[in-house]
Image: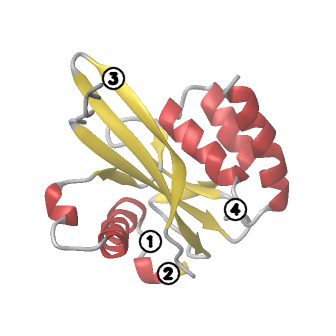
Amino acid sequence: MKTKRMVFKEVVFYGMLFNLSGDILLRRLYGSDDKIFPGGIVETKDIAGYDDETWIRRFFGRAFEEQAGIPYEEIIEPKIQPMPAHYIVYGNGFSVLYAGIIVGKTDFLSTMAHFVNLDDFIRMERLGVINRPTKIFGLRAFASRDCPNKKYRKIAGPVLKKEHK
């Protein structure tokens, strides 16, 4: 039996970055009050000629600098950790694949974006300020071992589990 290969019109990578307290970085979506993670649409020029680790570092280095004002050199122990999940949005013949990557931690203070604790993150989701892919990846990041705050990990896991019921 032949399987149909899925082709996505766009692939969007989100980069999750924690501060040392375990809060997660969100930026404002251009032209909106909605909040998302730094990152964006990956284009051929971003990946051509580079291995996985190199293009990811270059892509997120540029994204954090341009979208959050955080130089990549300010990331403490950068750890490129692909999330074991993706999120697909379909609509009007258009498909977008969202993928999340945990990039690391920083103690750098940004004036262009801000760090959000887990309670505020959940509150923002209820207010409709963050979209579903941001919510899923944010909860996964908070629940992961990469989150420096153990309390957040204990809370986010059950919230994420409840979300998938």
Cα distance, mark 3 to mark 4?
Answer: 30 Å
Q: Which residue is mark 3?
A: 90
Cα distance, mark 3 to mark 2?
Answer: 36 Å
* Label 1 or label 3, whichever comes before in sequence order: 1
Cα distance, mark 2 to mark 1?
Answer: 7 Å
Q: Which residue is mark 2?
A: 74
* Label 2 or label 4, whichever comes before in sequence order: 2
As drawn, is 147 to the left or to the right of 38? right
Cα distance, mark 1 to mark 3?
Answer: 32 Å
Task: Give the number of the mark in front: 1 or 4.
Answer: 4
Cβ–Cβ below 8 Å for labels 2 and 4?
no
10 Å neighbourhood of mark 1: few (<14), some, or many (≥20)? many
What is the residue that sits farthest to the front in this orientation?
1
Q: Look at label 3 and name its amino acid.
A: Tyr
Task: Give the number of the mark in front: 2 or 4.
Answer: 4
Per the rendering, the mark at residue 147 is: 4
Disc 2 element:
helix
